[in-house]
Amino acid sequence: MESETASTNHLALGLHRVLPAILPAFLISVGYVDPGKWAANVEGGARFGLDLLVFVLIFNFAAILCQYLSAQIGVVTKRDLAEICSDEYDRCVCILLGIQLEFSMIALDISMIVGMAHALNLLLGADLFSCIFLTAIDAVFYPLFANLLENCKAKLICVCIACFIICAFVFGLLLSQAEIPQTINGVPTVFSGESAFMLISLLGASILPQNFYLHSALIQVSLSLSLSLSLSLSLSLSLELRISAMVSEGILLGMGNPLLDIIAVVDDEFLRKYDIKLNNAILAEDKHLPMYEEMASNYSVDYIAGGATQNSIRVAQWMLQVPGATSFIGCIGKEKFGEEMKKNAKLAGVNVHYYEDENAPTGTCAVCVVGGERSLIANLSAANCYKSDHLKQPENWALVEKAKYFYIAGFFLTVSPESIQLVAEHAAANNKLFMMNLSAPFICEFFKDAQEKVLPYMDYVFGNETEARTFSKVHGWETDDIEEIALKISQWPKASGTYKRITVITQGPDPVVVAEDGKVKKFPVIKLPKEKLVDTNGAGDAFVGGFLSQLVKEKPIEDCVKAGCYAANVIIQRPGCSYPEKPNFE
């Protein structure tokens, strides 16, 4: 069974690679299915027999070589020949090339019209002028008719016409039973003005400059049609090819504080003892350090690899189901918890490049759950030791070069703002998408300057309603209206004009607010009965992960929000930021 599947996949993949070359070739062949060209060859044969055959072969091989080179130019440069000429030559040369091309097309059209007219004259016996008139009308109205059709249908008609003419030509050749002499000179024994003129005519009929321009463009625009045809051969392979075509290895890179989540359902007394507010996120102080041991001793505890950014990247990887599509950079301790973190990340399919600190233990995050609501108390430890020198190492910076999308939670501003700035500037300089999260009220309050420095580089800003209102208060906006705050954040000045900033604010069970291009949209979330709510820990991280999984596929904002809501809905029905083996998102 496995060998049969592998054989089927190999066949489909082979066709997937061949079809993009075959279809443009068929379309280009329409340009060579030219009655005028055939008329020139027929006249040459009638006057000189087979004496010019060698030259005809040379001209045709030259045309094949030129067509191959024009197709290769389109594949390698991702531009057509006209664009390349426009970039490489000055205006005068481009004008001369344009004039030459127009004359070539006019000559081709005239030869086609005259050739078709002669054919109609021979078949119908009508006078030559009427045949030319009918052919000219066809030459004018067919492009208009083809323009009314969809692009794929117009191409299909051209291919069918070419195939029909070729079949008719071969059939007629077989019926004629032409005799081939035993000996063929192939080269005229004596050149004359008449034979030289005929050679020029045959050369012009064989090498068509306009087809070179056309082939270099068609080789690119026909890829989508070829892909759809090849994918239809195997339904199971179609999803894999479609995803792999859009999601490349390492397309999404996250950078943040990897923490081992210590999750426990506690009581209100525990929260009061350690001065913890429900549904909040803070950094651990000295007074919080004993709580980790107390949680492990007095409560049922789950350990899950976490940290805000790493959670989002793990969820995005789970939603994508493409191994190695995501990468993550952060700092862990060189001990058993660090090894457990690496093991979990590898199982999740994330390509992690951790900086391993030999002195500090792996960071932990106490997740205190009461009534489904959670509070996070992060003891960064090794996560707080990350240095930008690690990012600058060639093997790690290669992840930055490869990625097209970057996501960093605001918590990382407390650790390595220099690293964030390096990635942000790289994204702006290379037209890549850079995204961050407000993450927590204390980030907006106590790390305002660092946040404002990187905000101009942010193409997407995520956050929840509490963080958004804190951001508004810190910046003196004097408004608690989430839509207005989201709009103001989206209109904050940008370092690069490539993308307009989009602000995405979640509000728990209330609609998601998206501010984009001066407008605000709201999207409903998936309602969940209270009895199914297990733990809201990681819900915001999961929303971002689901959102990013569709963003890297270049899906519209509606689909991104829908995926984010789906991922968050799955996560809050499970302990910690955990998920089933495969998503069920459509």
Image (tube, helix red, strand yellow):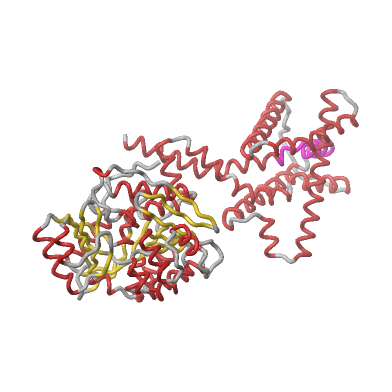
Q: Is residue 152 above or below residue 396?
A: above
| Image spot of residue 57 (x, y percent) | 70, 44
| Image spot of residue 197 (x, y percent) | 85, 47
Furthest residue in direction front, as rendered: 478
Residue 291 in view here: yes
Q: Quadrant of residue 529?
A: top left
Q: Determine the residue positioned at 86% across, 33% down.
A: 132
Left/right placement of residue 137 relative to residue 161 reads right
Residue 316 in view here: no
Q: Is-magenta flag for residue 42?
A: yes
Residue 264 vs residue 408, the one in the foreground:
264
Tell me the quarter of the image containing the N terminus: top left
Q: Is residue 501 above or below residue 122?
A: below
Q: Determine the residue positioned at 36% across, 55% down.
A: 324
Q: Is-magenta flag for residue 456?
A: no
Q: Mainly helix, strand or loop, the magenta region?
A: helix
Left/right placement of residue 206 relative to residue 513 reads right
Over which residues does the magenta segment extend? 31-49
Tell me the quarter of the image containing the C terminus: top left
Q: Determine the residue positioned at 74% across, 48% down.
A: 208
Residue 470 vs residue 455, the one in the foreground:
470
Residue 582 vs residue 87, the one in the foreground:
582
Q: Is residue 319 above or below residue 182?
A: below
Left/right placement of residue 278 relative to residue 163 reads left
| Image spot of residue 288 (x, y percent) | 18, 70
| Image spot of residue 347 (x, y percent) | 26, 53
Q: Determine the residue positioned at 36% across, 36% down.
A: 5
Q: Is residue 543 above or below residue 30?
A: below
Q: How many marks?
A: 0
